Amino acid sequence: MLSLSDFQVDRQIFEARFPQNFLFWDRAGQLWTYASRKLPDVNLVNVDPNHTQFETGNFQFFAEPSVVRVVSKDNEPFSEFEKMATIFFEMVVEFLDIELFDRVALRTVWAKQYDSTLQTAESFRELGLLSEPAGESFGIKTPPIGLDVKVTWEDERMGATLGCRAEKRKVDPKIPWDFRSQIHLKAAPPERYFLVLDIDYFTTAKVQRDQMDAREWIGSSYRFVKKAVGKEIFK
Amino acid sequence: MSTFQLDLLTGKIHTATGSTAAANQETGGFTIENAAAVSQSVQDQLEDLREIYPDPSPQLQRVITSLTEAILACNEAIQAEEAADKFRADDCMLKVQAASMELIELRGIGDGFGVVATALMFAFINKRGTPFSKIEMNAVLRTLKALRSAPFPTLENGAAVTEILEKAGLVIDPVPLTDLLREAQEAGFVDT
Protein backbone atom coordinates (compact mmCIF):
# COMPACT_ATOMS: atom_id res chain seq x y z
CA MET A 1 0.00 0.00 0.00
CA LEU A 2 1.45 3.34 -1.05
CA SER A 3 1.84 6.24 1.33
CA LEU A 4 3.31 9.72 1.02
CA SER A 5 6.40 8.63 2.94
CA ASP A 6 7.31 6.42 -0.06
CA PHE A 7 7.74 9.56 -2.13
CA GLN A 8 10.58 12.05 -2.20
CA VAL A 9 10.09 15.77 -2.57
CA ASP A 10 11.06 16.60 -6.12
CA ARG A 11 10.28 20.29 -6.31
CA GLN A 12 8.79 22.96 -4.06
CA ILE A 13 7.46 26.27 -5.34
CA PHE A 14 6.19 29.25 -3.42
CA GLU A 15 4.61 31.97 -5.51
CA ALA A 16 2.82 35.22 -4.76
CA ARG A 17 1.08 37.25 -7.45
CA PHE A 18 0.23 40.89 -6.97
CA PRO A 19 -1.06 43.80 -9.06
CA GLN A 20 1.51 45.17 -11.55
CA ASN A 21 4.16 46.98 -9.54
CA PHE A 22 6.45 49.22 -11.56
CA LEU A 23 8.70 50.04 -8.63
CA PHE A 24 10.31 46.81 -9.80
CA TRP A 25 11.95 48.67 -12.67
CA ASP A 26 13.37 51.27 -10.29
CA ARG A 27 14.58 48.88 -7.66
CA ALA A 28 15.71 45.74 -9.49
CA GLY A 29 19.38 46.69 -8.98
CA GLN A 30 18.85 47.34 -5.29
CA LEU A 31 17.07 44.01 -5.01
CA TRP A 32 20.06 42.22 -6.51
CA THR A 33 22.50 44.00 -4.19
CA TYR A 34 20.39 43.14 -1.17
CA ALA A 35 19.83 39.55 -2.33
CA SER A 36 23.54 39.02 -2.75
CA ARG A 37 24.01 40.05 0.88
CA LYS A 38 21.15 38.05 2.36
CA LEU A 39 21.29 34.83 0.32
CA PRO A 40 24.46 32.75 0.53
CA ASP A 41 26.50 32.37 -2.71
CA VAL A 42 23.71 33.70 -4.88
CA ASN A 43 24.33 34.02 -8.63
CA LEU A 44 22.55 36.33 -10.99
CA VAL A 45 20.99 34.34 -13.84
CA ASN A 46 18.83 36.90 -15.61
CA VAL A 47 18.52 40.69 -15.41
CA ASP A 48 15.84 41.33 -17.99
CA PRO A 49 13.88 44.46 -16.89
CA ASN A 50 10.76 42.32 -16.58
CA HIS A 51 12.33 39.22 -15.16
CA THR A 52 15.07 38.91 -12.57
CA GLN A 53 16.35 35.51 -11.61
CA PHE A 54 18.86 34.48 -8.98
CA GLU A 55 20.16 31.05 -8.13
CA THR A 56 21.97 29.46 -5.24
CA GLY A 57 22.46 25.72 -4.79
CA ASN A 58 19.14 24.02 -5.36
CA PHE A 59 17.19 27.26 -5.14
CA GLN A 60 15.93 29.57 -7.85
CA PHE A 61 14.47 32.99 -7.09
CA PHE A 62 12.31 34.87 -9.58
CA ALA A 63 11.02 38.41 -9.35
CA GLU A 64 8.82 40.13 -11.91
CA PRO A 65 6.59 43.24 -11.78
CA SER A 66 3.65 41.10 -10.69
CA VAL A 67 5.08 37.92 -9.25
CA VAL A 68 7.65 36.62 -6.80
CA ARG A 69 8.55 32.96 -6.95
CA VAL A 70 10.97 30.66 -5.13
CA VAL A 71 11.70 27.18 -6.45
CA SER A 72 13.68 24.43 -4.77
CA LYS A 73 14.83 21.43 -6.77
CA ASP A 74 15.57 17.88 -5.69
CA ASN A 75 14.92 16.63 -2.20
CA GLU A 76 15.71 19.92 -0.44
CA PRO A 77 14.54 19.84 3.22
CA PHE A 78 11.28 21.68 3.72
CA SER A 79 12.69 23.78 6.56
CA GLU A 80 15.40 25.14 4.25
CA PHE A 81 12.87 25.87 1.51
CA GLU A 82 10.61 27.62 4.02
CA LYS A 83 13.53 29.73 5.24
CA MET A 84 14.79 30.74 1.80
CA ALA A 85 11.30 31.43 0.45
CA THR A 86 10.52 33.64 3.43
CA ILE A 87 13.74 35.64 3.08
CA PHE A 88 13.21 36.31 -0.62
CA PHE A 89 9.48 36.96 -0.33
CA GLU A 90 9.93 39.48 2.50
CA MET A 91 12.73 41.16 0.59
CA VAL A 92 10.64 41.63 -2.56
CA VAL A 93 7.53 42.70 -0.63
CA GLU A 94 9.55 45.35 1.18
CA PHE A 95 11.36 46.59 -1.92
CA LEU A 96 8.22 46.80 -4.02
CA ASP A 97 6.03 47.99 -1.16
CA ILE A 98 3.34 45.45 -2.00
CA GLU A 99 0.04 45.91 -0.14
CA LEU A 100 -2.17 43.24 -1.67
CA PHE A 101 -1.71 39.76 -3.13
CA ASP A 102 -3.96 38.44 -5.85
CA ARG A 103 -2.86 34.88 -5.34
CA VAL A 104 -0.50 33.09 -2.96
CA ALA A 105 0.40 29.52 -3.78
CA LEU A 106 2.45 26.62 -2.57
CA ARG A 107 3.16 23.85 -5.04
CA THR A 108 4.82 20.67 -3.91
CA VAL A 109 5.86 17.91 -6.29
CA TRP A 110 6.58 14.47 -4.86
CA ALA A 111 8.01 11.62 -6.93
CA LYS A 112 8.58 7.92 -6.47
CA GLN A 113 10.93 6.05 -8.74
CA TYR A 114 10.14 2.68 -10.38
CA ASP A 115 12.03 0.24 -12.58
CA SER A 116 9.56 0.23 -15.46
CA THR A 117 6.61 2.05 -16.97
CA LEU A 118 4.42 -0.95 -16.20
CA GLN A 119 5.24 -0.83 -12.49
CA THR A 120 4.64 2.92 -12.42
CA ALA A 121 1.28 2.52 -14.15
CA GLU A 122 0.36 -0.27 -11.76
CA SER A 123 1.04 1.94 -8.74
CA PHE A 124 -0.95 4.73 -10.34
CA ARG A 125 -3.93 2.38 -10.69
CA GLU A 126 -3.64 1.42 -7.02
CA LEU A 127 -4.54 5.01 -6.11
CA GLY A 128 -7.92 4.58 -7.80
CA LEU A 129 -7.97 8.10 -9.24
CA LEU A 130 -8.88 6.99 -12.74
CA SER A 131 -11.19 4.50 -14.34
CA GLU A 132 -9.84 3.20 -17.65
CA PRO A 133 -11.80 1.78 -20.57
CA ALA A 134 -11.74 -1.98 -20.36
CA GLY A 135 -10.28 -4.14 -23.12
CA GLU A 136 -8.63 -3.15 -26.35
CA SER A 137 -8.36 0.55 -27.25
CA PHE A 138 -7.10 1.95 -30.57
CA GLY A 139 -6.25 -1.58 -31.58
CA ILE A 140 -3.83 -1.93 -28.66
CA LYS A 141 -4.41 -4.85 -26.34
CA THR A 142 -2.07 -3.89 -23.49
CA PRO A 143 -3.37 -1.57 -20.75
CA PRO A 144 -2.47 2.13 -21.00
CA ILE A 145 0.87 3.19 -19.54
CA GLY A 146 0.79 6.96 -19.93
CA LEU A 147 -1.52 7.90 -17.09
CA ASP A 148 -2.18 11.48 -16.16
CA VAL A 149 -4.88 12.99 -13.97
CA LYS A 150 -5.46 16.62 -13.02
CA VAL A 151 -8.25 17.77 -10.74
CA THR A 152 -8.91 21.28 -9.46
CA TRP A 153 -11.10 22.31 -6.54
CA GLU A 154 -11.85 25.96 -6.03
CA ASP A 155 -14.18 28.14 -3.97
CA GLU A 156 -14.20 31.87 -3.33
CA ARG A 157 -11.34 31.61 -0.82
CA MET A 158 -8.97 28.77 -1.60
CA GLY A 159 -8.18 26.35 -4.37
CA ALA A 160 -6.17 23.20 -4.89
CA THR A 161 -5.01 21.35 -7.96
CA LEU A 162 -4.00 17.74 -7.71
CA GLY A 163 -1.91 16.32 -10.51
CA CYS A 164 -0.89 12.69 -10.63
CA ARG A 165 1.01 11.16 -13.52
CA ALA A 166 3.21 8.28 -14.50
CA GLU A 167 6.25 9.95 -15.96
CA LYS A 168 9.35 8.91 -17.88
CA ARG A 169 12.42 11.08 -17.42
CA LYS A 170 15.85 11.05 -18.92
CA VAL A 171 18.26 11.35 -16.04
CA ASP A 172 20.86 13.87 -17.00
CA PRO A 173 24.27 12.97 -15.57
CA LYS A 174 25.47 15.98 -13.64
CA ILE A 175 28.44 16.94 -15.77
CA PRO A 176 29.61 20.54 -15.59
CA TRP A 177 28.82 22.45 -18.78
CA ASP A 178 32.49 23.23 -19.36
CA PHE A 179 33.32 19.55 -19.77
CA ARG A 180 30.34 18.47 -21.81
CA SER A 181 31.96 19.15 -25.16
CA GLN A 182 35.00 17.10 -24.18
CA ILE A 183 33.10 14.05 -23.01
CA HIS A 184 31.51 11.64 -25.44
CA LEU A 185 28.84 9.76 -23.59
CA LYS A 186 28.82 6.11 -24.62
CA ALA A 187 25.08 5.76 -24.26
CA ALA A 188 22.02 7.96 -24.21
CA PRO A 189 21.10 9.27 -20.73
CA PRO A 190 19.35 6.50 -18.80
CA GLU A 191 15.58 6.62 -18.47
CA ARG A 192 13.87 6.50 -15.12
CA TYR A 193 10.21 5.99 -14.33
CA PHE A 194 8.37 8.03 -11.76
CA LEU A 195 4.97 8.30 -10.22
CA VAL A 196 4.55 12.03 -9.67
CA LEU A 197 2.18 13.75 -7.26
CA ASP A 198 1.85 17.43 -7.93
CA ILE A 199 -0.22 19.53 -5.51
CA ASP A 200 -0.83 23.21 -5.97
CA TYR A 201 -2.57 24.86 -3.02
CA PHE A 202 -3.52 28.49 -3.49
CA THR A 203 -5.67 31.40 -2.38
CA THR A 204 -8.40 32.62 -4.68
CA ALA A 205 -9.41 35.60 -2.51
CA LYS A 206 -7.09 38.58 -2.34
CA VAL A 207 -4.88 38.65 0.74
CA GLN A 208 -3.76 41.85 2.40
CA ARG A 209 -0.11 42.27 3.23
CA ASP A 210 -0.95 42.57 6.94
CA GLN A 211 -2.64 39.19 6.82
CA MET A 212 0.31 37.46 5.24
CA ASP A 213 3.28 35.97 7.01
CA ALA A 214 5.17 33.91 4.48
CA ARG A 215 6.76 31.50 6.95
CA GLU A 216 3.48 30.88 8.73
CA TRP A 217 1.53 30.50 5.48
CA ILE A 218 4.03 28.15 3.84
CA GLY A 219 4.29 25.99 6.97
CA SER A 220 0.57 25.96 7.54
CA SER A 221 -0.23 25.11 3.92
CA TYR A 222 2.43 22.42 3.72
CA ARG A 223 1.14 20.67 6.86
CA PHE A 224 -2.42 20.95 5.58
CA VAL A 225 -1.59 19.60 2.12
CA LYS A 226 0.35 16.67 3.56
CA LYS A 227 -2.59 15.74 5.78
CA ALA A 228 -5.07 16.19 2.92
CA VAL A 229 -2.99 14.04 0.57
CA GLY A 230 -2.82 11.31 3.21
CA LYS A 231 -6.57 11.50 3.67
CA GLU A 232 -7.72 11.92 0.07
CA ILE A 233 -5.17 10.04 -2.03
CA PHE A 234 -3.71 7.28 0.14
CA LYS A 235 -6.99 6.23 1.75
CA MET B 1 -12.71 40.17 -6.92
CA SER B 2 -12.93 38.98 -3.33
CA THR B 3 -10.77 39.76 -0.31
CA PHE B 4 -10.45 38.23 3.12
CA GLN B 5 -12.48 40.39 5.54
CA LEU B 6 -13.49 40.14 9.17
CA ASP B 7 -17.24 39.98 9.69
CA LEU B 8 -18.19 41.55 13.00
CA LEU B 9 -21.62 40.00 12.98
CA THR B 10 -20.21 36.54 13.17
CA GLY B 11 -16.61 37.23 14.09
CA LYS B 12 -15.67 35.16 11.05
CA ILE B 13 -13.10 35.99 8.46
CA HIS B 14 -14.84 35.68 5.13
CA THR B 15 -14.43 36.86 1.61
CA ALA B 16 -15.97 40.15 0.58
CA THR B 17 -16.62 41.07 -3.00
CA GLY B 18 -16.93 44.33 -4.93
CA SER B 19 -18.85 47.04 -3.13
CA THR B 20 -18.89 45.15 0.19
CA ALA B 21 -15.12 45.10 0.22
CA ALA B 22 -14.96 48.80 -0.70
CA ALA B 23 -17.47 49.73 1.97
CA ASN B 24 -15.64 47.70 4.58
CA GLN B 25 -12.39 49.33 3.63
CA GLU B 26 -13.91 52.80 4.08
CA THR B 27 -15.01 52.02 7.60
CA GLY B 28 -11.95 49.95 8.37
CA GLY B 29 -14.25 46.91 8.29
CA PHE B 30 -15.75 47.71 11.69
CA THR B 31 -19.29 48.44 12.78
CA ILE B 32 -19.42 48.72 16.51
CA GLU B 33 -23.22 48.41 16.55
CA ASN B 34 -22.86 44.84 15.44
CA ALA B 35 -20.07 43.99 17.82
CA ALA B 36 -22.49 42.75 20.46
CA ALA B 37 -23.51 39.97 18.13
CA VAL B 38 -20.13 38.28 18.41
CA SER B 39 -20.95 35.21 20.41
CA GLN B 40 -19.15 32.31 18.85
CA SER B 41 -16.85 30.13 20.83
CA VAL B 42 -13.10 30.53 20.57
CA GLN B 43 -12.85 27.20 18.79
CA ASP B 44 -15.39 28.19 16.14
CA GLN B 45 -13.46 31.34 15.37
CA LEU B 46 -10.19 29.45 15.22
CA GLU B 47 -11.73 27.35 12.50
CA ASP B 48 -12.45 30.52 10.52
CA LEU B 49 -8.87 31.73 10.58
CA ARG B 50 -7.98 28.44 8.95
CA GLU B 51 -9.42 29.85 5.77
CA ILE B 52 -6.14 31.70 5.37
CA TYR B 53 -3.95 29.50 7.56
CA PRO B 54 -5.44 26.01 7.28
CA ASP B 55 -3.10 24.47 9.83
CA PRO B 56 -1.73 27.33 11.97
CA SER B 57 1.40 26.95 14.07
CA PRO B 58 0.90 26.65 17.86
CA GLN B 59 2.11 30.24 18.20
CA LEU B 60 -0.46 31.62 15.76
CA GLN B 61 -3.15 29.50 17.41
CA ARG B 62 -2.29 31.10 20.75
CA VAL B 63 -2.40 34.56 19.19
CA ILE B 64 -5.84 33.98 17.78
CA THR B 65 -7.14 32.33 20.94
CA SER B 66 -5.94 35.22 23.10
CA LEU B 67 -7.32 37.81 20.72
CA THR B 68 -10.65 36.04 20.46
CA GLU B 69 -10.92 35.73 24.24
CA ALA B 70 -10.09 39.42 24.60
CA ILE B 71 -12.66 40.36 21.94
CA LEU B 72 -15.40 38.31 23.60
CA ALA B 73 -14.61 39.79 27.04
CA CYS B 74 -14.49 43.33 25.63
CA ASN B 75 -17.78 42.77 23.94
CA GLU B 76 -19.30 41.61 27.19
CA ALA B 77 -17.85 44.66 28.93
CA ILE B 78 -19.57 46.96 26.42
CA GLN B 79 -22.87 45.16 26.94
CA ALA B 80 -22.49 45.47 30.71
CA GLU B 81 -21.63 49.15 30.39
CA GLU B 82 -24.74 49.69 28.28
CA ALA B 83 -26.76 47.96 30.98
CA ALA B 84 -25.13 50.27 33.55
CA ASP B 85 -23.57 47.23 35.25
CA LYS B 86 -20.27 48.91 36.10
CA PHE B 87 -18.89 46.07 38.18
CA ARG B 88 -19.36 43.47 35.45
CA ALA B 89 -17.97 45.87 32.86
CA ASP B 90 -14.86 46.42 34.97
CA ASP B 91 -14.53 42.71 35.62
CA CYS B 92 -14.69 41.99 31.88
CA MET B 93 -12.10 44.66 31.13
CA LEU B 94 -9.78 42.93 33.61
CA LYS B 95 -10.18 39.78 31.51
CA VAL B 96 -9.34 41.81 28.41
CA GLN B 97 -6.24 43.10 30.18
CA ALA B 98 -5.16 39.57 31.11
CA ALA B 99 -5.60 38.39 27.51
CA SER B 100 -3.77 41.48 26.22
CA MET B 101 -0.82 40.69 28.49
CA GLU B 102 -0.57 37.34 26.79
CA LEU B 103 -0.24 39.14 23.48
CA ILE B 104 2.93 40.77 24.80
CA GLU B 105 4.36 37.31 25.28
CA LEU B 106 3.53 36.53 21.65
CA ARG B 107 4.82 39.78 20.15
CA GLY B 108 7.58 37.85 18.39
CA ILE B 109 5.23 37.08 15.51
CA GLY B 110 5.88 40.50 14.02
CA ASP B 111 7.07 44.05 14.66
CA GLY B 112 3.69 45.60 13.90
CA PHE B 113 1.95 43.11 16.16
CA GLY B 114 4.42 44.01 18.92
CA VAL B 115 3.66 47.71 18.52
CA VAL B 116 -0.08 47.14 18.89
CA ALA B 117 0.29 44.68 21.77
CA THR B 118 2.58 47.10 23.61
CA ALA B 119 0.17 50.01 23.02
CA LEU B 120 -2.68 47.93 24.44
CA MET B 121 -0.60 47.00 27.48
CA PHE B 122 0.28 50.64 28.20
CA ALA B 123 -3.30 51.74 27.61
CA PHE B 124 -4.27 49.47 30.50
CA ILE B 125 -1.31 50.41 32.70
CA ASN B 126 -1.89 54.12 32.18
CA LYS B 127 -5.51 53.79 33.22
CA ARG B 128 -4.14 52.93 36.67
CA GLY B 129 -7.15 50.88 37.61
CA THR B 130 -9.76 53.50 36.75
CA PRO B 131 -12.76 52.15 34.82
CA PHE B 132 -12.90 52.36 31.03
CA SER B 133 -15.52 54.55 29.40
CA LYS B 134 -17.68 53.08 26.64
CA ILE B 135 -15.70 55.01 24.01
CA GLU B 136 -12.46 53.58 25.37
CA MET B 137 -13.90 50.06 25.44
CA ASN B 138 -14.98 50.42 21.82
CA ALA B 139 -11.50 51.60 20.89
CA VAL B 140 -9.94 48.57 22.60
CA LEU B 141 -12.42 46.32 20.81
CA ARG B 142 -11.64 47.85 17.41
CA THR B 143 -7.92 47.51 18.04
CA LEU B 144 -8.25 43.87 19.02
CA LYS B 145 -10.37 43.16 15.96
CA ALA B 146 -7.98 44.94 13.66
CA LEU B 147 -5.19 42.75 15.01
CA ARG B 148 -7.24 39.61 14.73
CA SER B 149 -8.22 40.39 11.16
CA ALA B 150 -4.63 41.12 10.13
CA PRO B 151 -2.18 39.79 12.71
CA PHE B 152 0.95 40.63 10.71
CA PRO B 153 0.89 44.41 10.22
CA THR B 154 4.04 46.23 9.23
CA LEU B 155 5.56 48.57 11.78
CA GLU B 156 3.87 51.57 10.14
CA ASN B 157 0.49 49.88 9.86
CA GLY B 158 0.77 48.68 13.45
CA ALA B 159 1.41 52.26 14.55
CA ALA B 160 -1.65 53.35 12.56
CA VAL B 161 -3.80 50.79 14.39
CA THR B 162 -2.71 52.22 17.76
CA GLU B 163 -4.19 55.57 16.72
CA ILE B 164 -7.61 54.07 17.40
CA LEU B 165 -6.66 53.93 21.08
CA GLU B 166 -5.13 57.39 21.11
CA LYS B 167 -8.15 58.96 19.43
CA ALA B 168 -10.32 57.54 22.21
CA GLY B 169 -8.13 59.35 24.73
CA LEU B 170 -6.16 56.35 25.94
CA VAL B 171 -2.50 56.94 26.72
CA ILE B 172 -0.33 54.37 24.99
CA ASP B 173 3.09 55.83 25.75
CA PRO B 174 5.37 53.92 28.08
CA VAL B 175 5.10 54.90 31.70
CA PRO B 176 8.01 57.28 32.50
CA LEU B 177 10.63 55.74 34.76
CA THR B 178 10.21 58.61 37.23
CA ASP B 179 6.53 57.71 37.66
CA LEU B 180 7.39 54.08 38.29
CA LEU B 181 10.04 55.14 40.79
CA ARG B 182 7.62 57.44 42.58
CA GLU B 183 5.01 54.69 42.79
CA ALA B 184 7.59 52.26 44.09
CA GLN B 185 8.68 54.82 46.69
CA GLU B 186 5.07 55.43 47.74
CA ALA B 187 4.55 51.69 48.08
CA GLY B 188 7.65 51.49 50.23
CA PHE B 189 9.64 49.28 47.85
CA VAL B 190 12.38 51.87 47.37
CA ASP B 191 14.05 54.09 49.96
CA THR B 192 13.66 57.81 49.38
Image: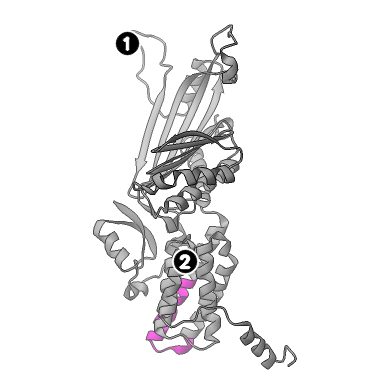
Q: Chain of mark 2?
A: B
B17 or B172, nearer to the observer: B172
Q: Which residue is mark 1?
A: A138
Which segment did they paint magenta? B70-88
Q: CA distance from mark 2 to mark 1?
A: 65 Å
**SS at circle 1:** loop
Name the disc covering residue B158, or none.
2
Which residue: 51% across, 45% down? A88
Q: Chain of mark 1?
A: A
Q: Residue B106: x and y, percent?
A: 57, 64
- The amino acid marked with disc number 1 is Phe
Q: Are tags 2 and 1 found on a single chain? A: no
Q: Is residue B109 magenta?
A: no
Q: Is residue A67 left or right of residue B127?
A: left
Which residue: 55% across, 26% down? A112
Q: Residue A129: x and y, percent?
A: 41, 29
Which residue: 34% across, 75% down? B32
B99 or A86, nearer to the observer: A86
B123 or A43, nearer to the observer: A43
Say whether residue A223 is visible.
no
Main secondary-structure element of the magenta-colored stretch? helix
